[in-house]
Amino acid sequence: METDKPSAAGELHELAAVLPMDYFGPQPGWRIVDTRELWRYRELGLVLALRDFKVRYRQAVIGALWAIIQPVSTLLVFQVLFVLLQRTPTSGDVPYAVTALCGLIPWYLFATLVRDASDSLVNNRHIITKIYFPRLLLPMSCSLVALIDYGISLLVLFGVMGYFGLYPAYSWFWLPVFTAITLLAGLSLGLWLSAMNAIYRDVRYIVPFLLQLGFYLTPTFYEQDSLIPERWRFLQALNPMTGVIAGFRWALTGSQPPDVAILGISLGSLLLVLITGLLFFRRAELYVTDRI
């Protein structure tokens, strides 16, 4: 039977062709990340990312349209809900559709990266057990597909903003910054989950629950000021995506800038998860081949 999916042998041959000649395997120690090694394997990282892209969209009936359907359908559900409740969970003059999409789109970028990164080691165990390369490239390569979906969703958001008469302002220059922070947030959690999933396979069943819980605990379809009591806002800010989404809304709509304290707590929390995630992943890399 013919299939579009390449054979394991063919895939290994393709990956081996871009491997550098001077590789010696993972080195012990608590070093956070070997940037020189990642740079030597940059071609392999690109090949892995392109492979994930081809696999994701090959023979997909809906394909990239899912990047539009998911946030828009979620928006419609909450739009109807809050109309029935006669309450809009926003505090400014920006239309609810724009406010909600400004929270939903970065959240789905984060969630897609976390979901794909958490499975990256297990899904590539046939490669991990055959050749050496920095395992960090696997969760990192998941960023390409997530960014493509994100870009498509942004086009929808821009169309909705144009419909309501909202046009680019100077704050739009901050959009790449908050996009990069969102990628770091997704990668940070993905590092923890991917290493744990390689050791404890039931972790993959916990990930959807964590993302669903995080969706409601993050101001995605609502603004923090409108629903969360002031005494709980700093606790919610421990969620890295809280400050990121507030910054994302400000960057696109020019509304009230994010609270500096809230943003600072979120970024500090993100930095902690990122550093510990890199350390944990680095240590797990030494023995993951035997456990996976």
Image: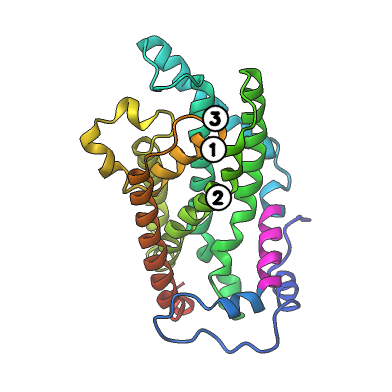
Give the prevailing secondary structure in the magenta stretch. helix
Q: Please say whether residue 138 is one of the residues in the magenta stretch.
A: no
Q: Residue at x 61, y 23 (%)?
A: 166
Amino acid type, callout 3: Thr
Q: Please say whether residue 51 is one of the residues in the magenta stretch.
A: yes
From the viewer's perspective, tell me whether residue 180 is left or right of residue 237: right
**Can you tell which quarter of the image residue 222 is in?**
top left
Residue picked out by circle 2? 177
**Can you tell which quarter of the image residue 89 is in?**
top left
Q: Residue at x 69, y 74 (%)?
A: 12
Q: Is residue 95 above or below residue 145?
A: above
- Where is residue 178 drawn, in percent x and y? 52, 47
Amino acid type, callout 1: Ala
Q: Is residue 292 above or below residue 58?
A: below
| Proximity of marks 2 and 3: CB atoms separated by less than 8 Å | no
* C-alpha distance separating marks 2 and 3: 15 Å
Q: Is residue 78 above or below residue 123?
A: above
In the rendered image, the residue lying farthest to the right is: 2
Residue picked out by circle 1? 251
